[in-house]
Image: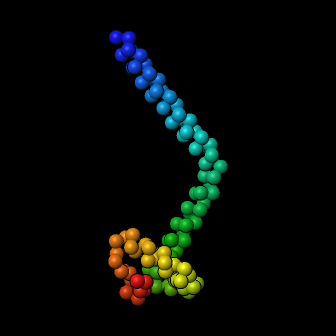
Amino acid sequence: MRKDSDSEGSVQRGERIKAWLSQARFYAEEFYSARYRGAIARAQRDEDDLFMLMVFSELMGVPNPVSYYTLELQPLMLERFHDWHKRMGMEHSPLDDFRCC
């Protein structure tokens, strides 16, 4: 009988320690990220604004101004594009005008 109560006590103590460590981890993460929360929110808003601008400009027929500048990145992105479409399970490039393999 004594062994059962000892094992139950150690299980309860282990659960209390786990709960305390979980709560301590939560507070440590909050303490660390609190000062960056505003900057992260601003960056997220800026990214969303840029996405909305690109989507609506495409919808309205305005040409993408970035496409000209990203053309020079094509050689750098070619290898990454090939790895990407292989990971997605596509044997060949999904783009008709863009052959990479």
Q: Name the residue at 51% across, 36% down.
A: 22
Tell me, yes or no, if residue 48 can be seen here: yes
Can I make out residue 65 in this image? Answer: no
Of residues 64 and 74, the one drawn nearer to the viewer in this rendering: 74
Position in image of residue 37 (x %, y %): 60, 52
Instruction: Name the residue at the right extreme.
Output: 35
- Give the residue at x 38% y 11%: 2
Placement of 99 over or under 23, stated as above or below: below
Compared with 40, 23 (above or below) is above
Position of 4 with respect to 25 (left or right) is left
Please give left or right for residue 78 compared with residue 38 in the image: left
* Residue furthest out toward the bottom: 97
Seen from the viewer's position, the closer of residues 47 and 31 is 31
Tell me what residue is drawn at x 59 percent, y 62 percent.
Answer: 43
Residue for point 52% across, 74% down: 53
State whether residue 87 is above or below residue 58: above
Q: Quadrant of the N terminus?
A: top left
Q: Position of residue 93 (x, y in %)?
A: 38, 81
Instruction: Judge whether 31 appears above or below 20 on screen.
Output: below
Residue 28 position in % (x across, y down)? 60, 40
Look at the image and tell me in which quarter the C terminus lies.
bottom left
Return the x and y of residue 5 as percentages of the image width and height: 39, 15
Q: Quadrant of residue 10?
A: top left
